[in-house]
Image: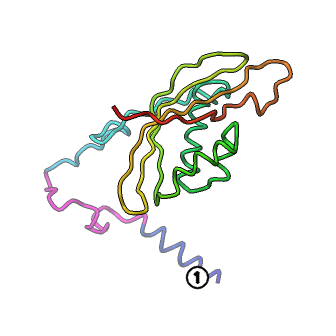
Amino acid sequence: MRLTLALFSLALMSACNRSPEQQPAENIPANLGENEATPAIPPPATGPNARTPLAEPKGPIDPRSVEAAGQVVQHYGALIEQRRWTESWKLWSEPDAARQFDRNWRDFSEVHLEIGDLGDTEGAAGSIYTTLPVVFYGKKTNGADYRERAEVILRRVNDVPGSTEAQRRWHIERIEWKRRT
């Protein structure tokens, strides 16, 4: 075993010590003549396919922010897309309202959710609300395409004495369909 390992190591070292003339020709471009210089390799991230680096994350999202409300809607969309209805109901303030809303999807083979721009927040009676425009789309079981606009209204309780952690998290208060104009 040691002899085999030693011979293998020796073969690897001898391959590394070959002169350029002994290297396989497959690594040399066919159109490179004797008097031509090898093209320079551009520094990293400067070639023709270089991309602008993504901005550094700003850090964790504040659970009280409108961005956190947007994450709730994203999570809801992912759950209904996967038909995980029972889990999606937990993102609502009233599970019964969630169950009733999900009856909309009985005749669908696919359900997806496209989320619009985050809205501003509004305060009222110890709570904060925000509204996110969305588009529900997919396919009905008969194969017909479906696309309908709605608004997701989210609410969280302000950080007031006596409020629970669950109340201070964003949750879906209701979803309102937008009439076609």
Can you name the residue that lies furthest to the right here? 162
Mark 1 element type: helix
Instruction: Identify the residue shown where x is 54% and y is 19%.
Output: 120
Q: Is residue 68 left or right of residue 27?
A: right
Give the main secondary structure, helix, strand or loop, of the magenta stretch: loop
Position of 106 with respect to 94 (left or right) is: left
Q: Residue at x 30, y 61 (%)?
A: 20
Quadrant for the N terminus, please.
bottom right
Q: How is the image coloured?
A: rainbow
Camera-side residue of 90 and 22: 90
* In the rendered image, the vertical position of residue 146 relative to residue 63, given as above or below: below
Residue 92 locus on image (x, y percent): 66, 39
Check disc 1 and give the amino acid type: Thr
In this figure, what is the number of numbered marks? 1
**Magenta stretch bounds:** 16-35
Q: Residues within 10 Å of mark 1 (few under 14, many from 20)?
A: few
Looking at the picture, does residue 133 appear above or below residue 103? above
Q: Which residue is mark 1?
A: 4
Q: Nearer the viewer, residue 45 or 22?
A: 45
Query: Does residue 28 sit above or below 97 in this rendering?
Result: below
Judge whether residue 179 is colored magenta: no
Of residues 143 and 156, the one drawn nearer to the viewer in this rendering: 143
Q: Position of residue 75 (x, y in %)?
A: 59, 43
**Image position of 25 (left or right of 100):** left
Residue at 33 percent of width and 31 percent of height: 181
**Residue beneath the point at 65% across and 27% down:** 155
Horizontal and vertical percent position of residue 55: 48, 29
- Determine which quarter of the picture holds residue 91: top right
- Answer whether residue 32 is magenta in the image: yes
Q: Position of residue 153 (x, y in %)?
A: 57, 30
